[in-house]
Amino acid sequence: MNIKICFIFLIFLITVASGLAPIKYKKLKENQNLLGIANTFSGGVFLAIAFVHIIPETSNNYYMLILKANEVLTKKPMIEYKMEDGVAV
């Protein structure tokens, strides 16, 4: 658990530094290639959070809710399909 918290803060600090660097340094603001790389990195952080943390936790909660309601589970991963559609939009 401690290593997870350390990595959360590490990713947060890298993201903040990447976001504030163009504001602080004028040369970075004018360099379109570097801004593109920083934009791509920040977008990748958001996608990684969605795919690695939010989607598995949501699907687990969904299936636990179905089990509590004593409904029959299908073999198809329905919640994953729904979330995949939401990401695709």
Image (spheres, rainbow, N blue to C red):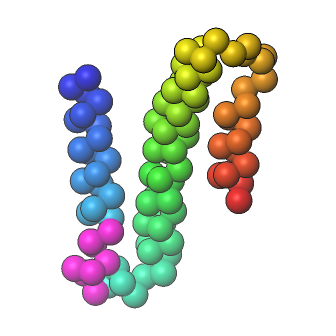
As drawn, 59 above or below 51 = above
Q: Is residue 56 left or right of residue 19?
A: right
**Towards the viewer: 42 or 82:** 82
Q: Residue at x 28, y 86 (%)?
A: 26
- The answer to which of 53 and 68 lies nearer the viewer is 68
**Residue 35 placement (x, y as % from top left):** 44, 74
**Residue 24 is inside the magenta segment:** yes
Residue at image point 55% right, 15% down: 68
Q: Is residue 52 visible?
A: no
Q: Residue at x 27, y 72 (%)?
A: 21
Q: Quadrant of the N terminus?
A: top left
Q: Could you tell me residue 8's position as x and y percent? A: 29, 41
Estimate the x, y position of residue 36 in percent, counting from the top left: 50, 72
The answer to which of 68 and 55 lies nearer the viewer is 68
Q: Please state if 45 lies on the left or on the right of 87 as rendered.
A: left
Horizontal side of 9 relative to 59 (left or right) equals left
Q: Is residue 44 above or below residue 10?
A: below
Q: How many marks?
A: 0
The segment highlighted magenta reads 19-26
Q: Is residue 3 left or right of residue 42?
A: left
Regarding residue 2, the answer to whether it shows in the image is yes
Q: Residue at x 58, y 28 (%)?
A: 62
Query: Among all residues in the image, which is located at the extreme front?
Result: 69
- Classified by dominant secondary structure, the portion drawn in magenta counts as helix
Q: Quadrant of residue 42?
A: bottom left
**Does the magenta segment cover residue 17?**
no
Locate residue 30, reporting x and y percent.
40, 87
Name the image quarter holding residue 10. Answer: top left
Quadrant showing the C terminus? bottom right
